Amino acid sequence: MITDQDQKFKTVLTELSDTLSEQSFFNAFLKQYPEDWKQLKVTYSKFKRSKQFGKTIPLPRPEEALRRTIRIWLKTTKKNA
């Protein structure tokens, strides 16, 4: 989970001046917030090593989770704009 997600996504969006795509947004987010990306990966690896793995609803891989979150945020932003 990304803290202050909406604010961080807005910051990334303002810095993207070229064509907006999910991939460019993803790359810009990784470049601008490497500590959040690291935290997502750490959380995933801890869950994967835990005894809960395989017995609960699985966590998506960090790349999938972040891309899905970006996709949903971009869709809701476009609808509100």
Image (tube, helix red, strand yellow):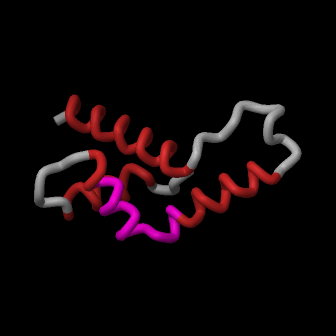
Residue 36 located within the stretch drawn in magenta: yes
Residue 60 located within the stretch drawn in magenta: no
Across and down, in percent, residue 21 comes to 22, 46
Q: Residue at x 18, y 60 (%)?
A: 16
Quadrant of image for the C terminus? top left
Q: Is residue 66 left or right of residue 74?
A: right
**Image vertical order of residue 61 relative to residue 43, above or below:** above
Across and down, in percent, residue 68 comes to 43, 39
Q: Residue at x 83, y 32 (%)?
A: 55
Magenta residue span: 25-37
Q: Which SS does the magenta portion mostly show? A: helix
Tally of marks: 0
Q: Residue at x 35, y 54 (%)?
A: 26
Q: Is residue 9 left or right of residue 3?
A: left
Name the residue at the left extreme: 18
Across and down, in percent, residue 12 comes to 28, 60
Q: Is residue 58 left or right of residue 54?
A: left
Across and down, in percent, residue 33 comes to 42, 67
**Image vertical order of residue 37 relative to residue 59, above or below:** below
